[in-house]
């Protein structure tokens, strides 16, 4: 058998297996996994290193107009390069509809920009903010058929939020067409009410962002979103979970057998609201929604990672430069509610979890692979093409040096943000070589790809997005006196 590339002598680790073997690659696919493969034109020696599936970064905001209408500072070039250096081979950002826009137009525009610039493979989720008849019954079904089989809805942000009725409509469309709905769950009116009280009392510094976006607001909206999902028997993924209240709501729903999934992010493991309490506006660097909480919330999130409440850890990379072009668009004295929401993290997502999770014994390597790659591929209809190392899968690999030690500094990162919230952390382990469909995109720390080298990956309907088929009485014609509702 002939190969284009052989990765030799590494330890291959997937969500379920660990094997010392070579990886034979031809035409962008993995075609052999065994020791002693014959010589290929290109060889990579992975002795002493771990060969893991490339990361699937399933929550990032790239070249997107945000919740406050501000453009993120990473485009598909810098965003995908930064992702690749952090061990990812697929990114899944958001094509975001704002009210009044056609989702079809938004997607066409997004697609053109991604195709021209991404250095690694990509797909994207849709953000549905205008759930009108045409979007629900014409545009969404068309886009799902094109392989865009997931969409995010918001319960907060004036420009994006849907009411409960509209979320039920979106869930029903997802149920009929086979798509996964993701929800940003925070109670809008609680945030609005707290914000007004805080500002009226003269509290405008960034740290009050962390107070206004209350944990109670997140817990309430999470419970409510789960109830909406239960009513229509359609699975739901609660994204960027930050606190115990929301974690418990998800856990309880899972115990009842509901198909409720959870995602968390590094900011809820490594940052707290005290990071927002800095000199002047510096706390703005840590303003994201939901905000980082406290030490006991961090523990609750780690527990949720360990006991399976969370299926994925994503970055929620929402990059804004710390200046008036982006993060502080409302000026250097902006009140907390005018600061762009979001923090960077696409390059450090996996290194942070590797170092603090695997190296410190909180999770094992298989769970790390699951959380950063396999489960995202499964949830979003990319598995087994992505998310694992098996014969027939895309040759998407990250070769990790598990022993290298370093201190985090933005100078070593590749995004266009200008700072990292994790500066100064001492970490162990880095993905030194990253391969996407057989192309060595990062070669021993050097970029070896051009904008546009990545390709769009259409996604299948995910099994995890299928309804349970267990209807509550109110929608079950056998028990609701014959009314057909779903
Ligand atoms: O603060 C955040 N997370 N900004 C990004 C937008 C979102 O809600 O995911
Ligand atoms: Zn279909
Ligand atoms: Zn969100
Ligand atoms: Zn987000």
Image: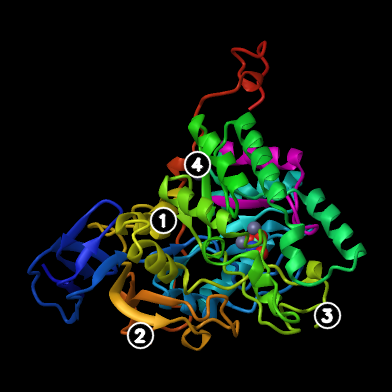
Ranked by sequence position, the earlier of labels 1 and 3 is 3
Give the residue at mark 3. Answer: 333
Where in the figure is residue 392, as x and y percent of width and height? 26, 57
107 left or right of 305 in image: right
For label 2, count other residues whose C-alpha is less than 10 Å away and answer few (under 14), some (14-19) or many (20+): few
Residue 389 higher or lower than 174, as above or below: below
The quadrant of the rendered image in which ligand 4 is seen is bottom right
363 left or right of 181 in image: left
Magenta-colored span: 149-176
Ranked by sequence position, the earlier of labels 2 and 4 is 2
For label 4, count other residues whose C-alpha is less than 10 Å away and answer few (under 14), some (14-19) or many (20+): many
Q: Closer to the observer: label 2 or label 4?
A: 2
Q: Nearer the viewer, residue 188 or 56?
A: 188
Residue 167 higher or lower than 33, as above or below: above
Element type where label 4 sits in the image? helix
For label 3, count other residues whose C-alpha is less than 10 Å away and answer few (under 14), some (14-19) or many (20+): some
**Residue 160 within the segment the image draws in magenta:** yes
Where in the figure is residue 155, as x and y percent of width and height? 72, 49
Ranked by sequence position, the earlier of labels 1 and 2 is 1
Query: Is the shortest distance between ligand 4 and the CB of mark 2 under 8 Å?
Result: no
**Residue 455 within the segment the image draws in magenta:** no
Q: Nearer the viewer, residue 192 or 114?
A: 192
In the image, what residue occupies the spot 31% across and 59% down? 365
Q: Closer to the observer: label 3 or label 2?
A: 3
Residue 445 bears which disc, if any? 2
Pointer 4 with pointer 1, Cβ within 8 A: no
Give the residue at mark 1. Answer: 371
């Amino acid at each position: 058998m002939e190969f284009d590339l052989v990765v030799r002598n590494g330890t291959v680790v997937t969500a379920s297996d660990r094997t010392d073997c070579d990886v034979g690659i031809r035409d962008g696919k993995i075609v052999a996994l065994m020791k002693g493969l014959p010589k290929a034109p290109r060889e990579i020696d992975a002795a002493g290193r771990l060969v893991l599936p490339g990361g699937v970064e399933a929550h990032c905001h790239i070249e997107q107009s945000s919740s406050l209408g501000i453009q993120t500072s990473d485009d598909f070039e810098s965003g995908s390069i930064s992702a690749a250096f952090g061990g990812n081979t697929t990114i899944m950002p958001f094509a975001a509809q704002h009210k009044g826009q056609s989702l079809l137009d938004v997607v066409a525009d997004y697609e053109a920009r991604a195709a021209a610039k991404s250095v690694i493979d990509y797909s994207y989720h849709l953000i549905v903010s205008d759930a009108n008849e045409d979007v629900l019954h014409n545009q969404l079904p068309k886009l799902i058929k094109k392989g865009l089989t997931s969409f995010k809805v918001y319960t907060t942000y004036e420009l994006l939020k849907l009411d409960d009725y509209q979320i039920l409509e979106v869930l029903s469309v997802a149920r009929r067409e086979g798509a996964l709905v993701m929800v940003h769950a925070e109670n809008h009116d609680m945030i609005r009410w707290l914000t007004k009280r805080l500002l009226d009392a003269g509290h405008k510094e960034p740290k009050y962002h962390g107070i206004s976006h209350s944990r109670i607001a997140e817990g309430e909206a999470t419970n409510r979103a789960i109830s909406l999902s239960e009513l229509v028997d359609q699975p739901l993924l609660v994204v960027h979970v930050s606190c115990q209240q929301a974690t418990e709501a998800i856990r309880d729903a899972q115990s009842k057998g509901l198909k409720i999934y959870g995602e968390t992010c590094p900011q809820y493991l490594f940052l707290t609201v005290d990071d927002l309490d800095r000199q002047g506006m510096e706390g703005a660097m840590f303003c994201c929604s939901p905000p980082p909480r406290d030490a006991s919330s961090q523990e609750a999130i780690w527990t949720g990672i360990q006991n399976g409440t969370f299926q994925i850890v994503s970055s929620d990379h929402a990059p804004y430069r710390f200046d008036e072009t982006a993060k502080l668009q409302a000026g250097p004295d902006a009140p907390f509610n005018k600061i762009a929401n979001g923090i960077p993290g696409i390059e450090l997502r996996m290194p942070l979890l590797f170092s603090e999770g695997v190296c410190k014994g909180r999770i094992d390597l298989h769970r790390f692979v699951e959380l950063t790659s396999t489960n995202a591929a499964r949830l979003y209809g990319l598995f087994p093409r992505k998310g694992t190392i098996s014969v027939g899968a895309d040759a998407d690999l990250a070769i990790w040096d598990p022993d290298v030690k370093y201190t985090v500094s933005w100078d070593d990162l590749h995004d266009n943000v200008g700072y990292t919230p994790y500066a100064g952390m001492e970490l162990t382990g880095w993905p030194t070589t990253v391969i996407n469909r057989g192309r060595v995109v990062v070669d021993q720390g050097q970029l070896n790809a051009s904008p546009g080298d990545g390709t769009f990956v259409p996604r299948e309907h995910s099994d995890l997005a299928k309804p349970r088929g267990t209807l509550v009485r109110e929608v079950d014609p056998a028990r609701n006196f014959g009314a057909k509702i779903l």
